[in-house]
Amino acid sequence: MAETLLSIKGISKYFGGLKAVDGVEFDVYAGEIFGIIGPNGAGKT
């Protein structure tokens, strides 16, 4: 298994009182191409 470069657990993002992202979890491994897609305003930043 490749080395874990980034591990994200339980991320949430709010815009005012609106929860755009709730409980996101993912790992990014060495040599992996990783992208996050979604509509504008979905909290990808």
Image: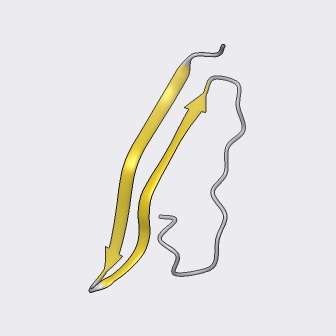
Q: Residue at x 48, y 47 (%)?
A: 25
In the image, residue 29 sits, relative to residue 21, either above or below, namely above
Q: How is the image coloured?
A: secondary structure
Q: In the image, is 32 to the left or to the right of 6?
A: right
Counting from the top left corner in percent of width and height, residue 13 is at: 36, 68
Counting from the top left corner in percent of width and height, residue 11 is at: 37, 54
Report the quarter where the N terminus lies.
Answer: top right
Q: Residue at x 43, y 42 (%)?
A: 8
Snapshot quadrant of residue 32: top right
Q: Residue at x 36, y 62 (%)?
A: 12
Q: In the image, is 7 to the left or to the right of 19?
A: right
- In the rendered image, the residue lying farthest to the bottom is 17
In the image, residue 13 sits, relative to residue 40, either above or below, namely above
> In this figure, what is the number of numbered marks?
0
Q: Nearer the viewer, residue 33 or 9?
A: 9
Counting from the top left corner in percent of width and height, residue 3 is at: 57, 16
Q: Residue at x 67, y 51 (%)?
A: 35
Q: In the image, is 33 to the left or to the right of 45?
A: right
